[in-house]
Image (cartoon, grey):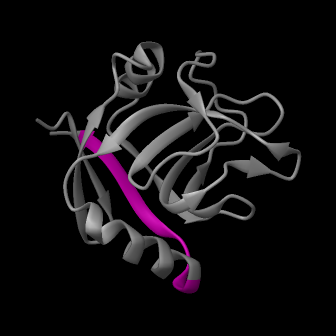
C-alpha cells in the first residue's frame, strides 16, 4: 500500500512513509505536503540525488539515522553540521558533505517503479536539475 506519490520529471513512483522507524520525521514532512522542489545530483555521496534546503527546519532530531541508504530509500538530514537536505539513493551511497560523513532519517521508501530510479539519477547527473513533487496517494 502506498502513502504517497513522488513525481520526478515525467516519472511517477509510489512510496510509503516509514512511520514505525521515523514517526516525527514522517509527520513533519507529511504536514509540508504537497512538497515541490528540484533534485540535483549529489556532490560527495555517490549514486544519489538531493534537495538542498538551506536553513529550513522540520523541527525534528535524528531517528533511524543512516549514512548508507539503499536504492529507493529517502532520508532527511535535519541540519546541524551541514544544511538541511533530503537525499534519494539510486545506487551505492555513503551520505556525506564537505564536512564529512553524515547520517539522515530514513523516512520514505519507494515501493513501485524502483527499476526507473537509476535512470533518473544518471539523467540528473548528465542533464541537470529535475522537478520533484511529493503528494498524497
Q: Residue at x 20, y 33 (%)?
A: 3
Q: Residue at x 56, y 85 (%)?
A: 126
> Is 89 placed above or below 30 here?
below
How many marks on residues?
A: 0
Q: Residue at x 74, y 39 (%)?
A: 102
Does 49 lie within the magenta span?
no
Give residue 83's quadrant in the image. Answer: top right
Does 130 lie within the magenta span?
yes
Q: Position of residue 22 (x, y in %)?
A: 44, 19
- Quarter in which the N terminus is drawn: top left
Q: Position of residue 122 (x, y in %)?
A: 49, 78
- Judge by depth and name the residue closer to the eye, 60 or 99: 99
Looking at the image, the residue that sits furthest to the left is 1
Q: Residue at x 67, y 35 (%)?
A: 103
> Is 85 placed above or below 29 here?
below
Q: Position of residue 2 (x, y in %)?
A: 15, 38
Q: Position of residue 63 (x, y in %)?
A: 55, 18
Looking at the image, the residue that sits furthest to the bottom is 126
Question: What main secondary structure does the magenta stretch of the protein show?
Answer: strand
Give residue 57's quadrant in the image. Answer: top right
Looking at the image, the residue that sits furthest to the right is 99
Magenta-tinted stretch? 126-135
On the rendered structure, is 5 left or right of 59? left
> Is 64 placed above or below 89 here?
above
> Is 81 placed above or below 35 here?
above
- Quarter in which the C terminus is drawn: top left
On the rendered structure, is 76 left or right of 84? left
On the rendered structure, is 131 left or right of 109? right
On the rendered structure, is 58 left or right of 82? left
Amino acid at each position: 500500500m502506498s502513502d504517497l506519490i513522488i513525481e520526478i520529471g515525467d516519472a511517477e513512483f509510489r512510496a510509503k512513509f516509514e512511520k514505525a522507524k521515523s514517526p516525527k520525521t514522517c509527520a513533519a514532512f507529511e504536514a509540508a505536503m504537497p512538497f515541490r522542489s528540484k533534485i540535483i545530483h549529489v556532490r560527495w555521496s555517490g549514486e544519489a540525488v538531493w534537495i538542498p534546503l538551506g536553513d529550513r527546519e522540520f523541527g525534528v532530531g535524528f531517528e533511524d539515522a543512516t549514512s548508507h541508504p539503499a536504492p529507493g530509500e529517502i532520508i532527511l538530514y535535519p541540519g546541524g553540521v551541514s544544511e538541511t537536505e533530503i537525499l534519494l539513493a539510486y545506487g551505492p551511497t555513503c551520505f556525506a558533505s564537505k564536512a564529512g560523513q553524515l547520517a539522515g532519517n530514513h523516512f520514505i521508501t519507494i515501493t513501485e517503479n524502483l527499476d526507473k530510479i537509476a535512470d533518473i539519477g544518471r539523467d540528473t547527473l548528465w542533464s541537470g536539475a529535475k522537478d520533484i513533487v511529493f503528494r498524497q496517494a
